[in-house]
Amino acid sequence: MMMAYAPWNQLPIDILSSIFERLDLEDRIRFDLVYKQWRTNLKRTPKLPWLMLPYDPSSQYLSFFDMYEGKVRKLDLPSSAQGGWFFGCSKVWLFLATGTNVDNLRIFLFDSISRAQIPLPPLSTISSFEENFTARRSGWNPAACIISGVEVSSFDASQCIVATTFYNNNKILALCKPQEDRWIIVEGLLPDGYFYGNLSFFDGELYACMLCEDREINNNQAPNSQTHFITLENHRVNLKLISSTPPPTYLFFAAVDDKKILYHKDCSRWPYLVEANG
């Protein structure tokens, strides 16, 4: 008599959780990629993340420091990703830029475990791109001089939305879905004198810090937080603008011998959005 076994995707959650808790971070990521319900239903104890180490564009692999295991891990790069520049990460995705100038600059989502490489729309589809994004530094990938922040909404690239901000034109926000033809530009939402700071997706909504160019302004003068609805093809994105105007910070430098203050320097603090439970 033959025995019937339940399919893997029908295993009880407590058994899957027990398996998951015994995996290191690399295998946990592979585990998540197998079946969507496993990723969304499991209760999990978080492990320390990997720290990406400095990357040489001539290298054939990426190096990470595994803070949980206390060792360096090396992951091979496909030839299509070698020579590129990695400029951020969100969820399981790294952001990869290839090309040596604005004309051939391409941006990808890159998964260092599965080595999946998913193209994003060319930045040249942004209106007046050439005129507004002109910053250059010798020896730098052009994306390093253009993109200031980037976030994705989901682990699933087929469902996620990508949001990015820019150095030269920090009053606009660009949104897209992977493998689509163009970026959707959001502008005109910020009060005068404000620009976009840190971004973060949470619960399907996009949060963005509004920062003031005048560092002497205080929180009593700051605009109220705002909610806007952005249509992106067949998706609607809720954008929540969070007003953040930290007061100026003054650093004082003192001489070692007589302990007198030599001078002070006016500095600023940069606020970040963080995800927290509780």
Image (cartoon, grey):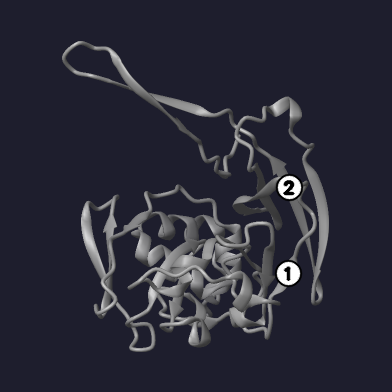
The single residue placed furthest to the front in the displayed view is 262
The reply to whether dot 2 and dot 1 touch (C-beta < 8 Å) is no
Judge whether 144 appears above or below 238 on screen. Answer: below
Residue 227 in percent (x, y) is at 81, 49
Residue 251 in percent (x, y) is at 40, 26
Identify which residue, 191 or 204, lies in the foreground. Answer: 191
Q: Amino acid at mark 1?
A: Ile
The single residue placed furthest to the left in the displayed view is 257
- Describe residue 256's horizontal placement relative to residue 126 as left or right: left
Judge whether 97 appears above or below 236 on screen. Answer: below
- On the image, numbered disc 1 is attached to which residue? 185
Q: State which quadrant residue 165 falls in.
A: bottom right
Q: Residue at x 75, y 29 (%)?
A: 221
- Describe residue 57's horizontal placement relative to residue 209 as left or right: left
Residue 13 in percent (x, y) is at 55, 58
Q: Nearer the viewer, mark 2 or mark 1?
A: 1
Q: Residue at x 62, y 74 (%)?
A: 131
Secondary structure state at the residue bearing disc 1: strand
- On the image, numbered disc 2 is attached to which residue? 241
Residue 99 in percent (x, y) is at 43, 84
- Describe residue 109's horizontal placement relative to residue 161 as left or right: left
Secondary structure state at the residue bearing disc 2: strand
- Describe residue 37's horizontal placement relative to residue 19 as left or right: right
Label total for image? 2
Identify which residue, 17 or 121, lies in the foreground. Answer: 121
Instruction: Say few, some or many: other residues with alpha carbon within 10 Å of mark 1 (under 14 / 14 to 19 / 20 or more).
Output: some
